[in-house]
Amino acid sequence: MEIEYNSAKTNTFEHKMYDNEIIHCPANFSKEDKKRIKDAALNIYRVLNGKDYSRIDMIVGKDGIPYFLEINTFAGLTMDSKKDEDGKMKVHHGYMGYAAKAAGMTAAEFIGNILESAIERYGLRDKDTRKLTS
């Protein structure tokens, strides 16, 4: 996913939360750049010991090199922007939601994949999970 800035010079609260960004998903990068970015993100995720899901934020320099900014281990999962009766945005469409939609996932599939990852990681597949709800 790529964020293109419009009039803002940075991703301010208003810019992000009121969906004033220009979003490209999938991102507008060459095949080589996409591979470089994906490889960097996966390496960062592994080195920082990410679990189940997270978002790796980067800026791609004019030199084509992805520069790591942060790992967001609790990135927003919303998939739909909602508008009020005046047409103004009420709910921010999360960046992870854009990526999930681009991958053809529904909200249930997206959340389900995250849960499946945690179930596998904790070895709960064959255990009695009723104890988890008490």
Image: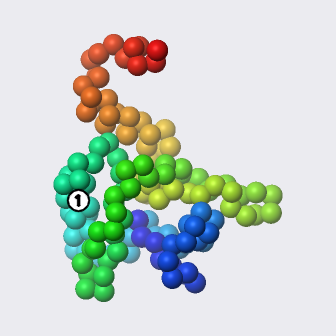
Q: Where does residue 6 sit, x and y in percent of width and height?
A: 55, 81
Q: Residue at x 27, y 48 (%)?
A: 50
Q: Residue at x 55, y 72 (%)?
A: 12
Above or below residue 81? Residue 50 is above
Tell me the SS state at disc 1. helix
- Left or right of 130 in this view: 85: right
Q: Judge whether residue 132 can be spotted in this image.
A: yes
- Which quadrant would residue 83 be assigned to in this image? bottom right
- Left or right of 17 in this view: 29: left
Q: Residue at x 22, y 70 (%)?
A: 36
- Which quadrant would residue 110 be assigned to in this image? top left
Q: 32 or 119: which is nearer to us?
A: 119
- Left or right of 70 in this view: 80: right
- Which quadrant would residue 82 be assigned to in this image? bottom right
Total numbered badges shown on the rendered structure: 1
Above or below residue 97? Residue 18 is below
Q: Residues within 10 Å of mark 1 (few under 14, many from 20)?
A: some
Mark 1, residue position:
44
Q: Judge whether residue 19 can be spotted in this image.
A: no
Q: Where does residue 134 sit, x and y in percent of width and height?
A: 46, 15
Coloring applied to the structure: rainbow
Above or below residue 53? Residue 64 is below
Q: 122 or 100: which is nearer to us?
A: 122
Q: Quadrant of the N terminus?
A: bottom left
- Left or right of 5 in this view: 130: left
Amino acid bearing label 1: Ile
Q: Where does residue 67 sit, x and y in percent of width and height?
A: 28, 73
Q: Where does residue 31 sit, x and y in percent of width and height?
A: 26, 72
Q: Residue at x 64, y 55 (%)?
A: 91
Above or below residue 91? Residue 62 is below
Q: Residue furthest bottom?
A: 62
Q: Residue furthest right?
A: 85
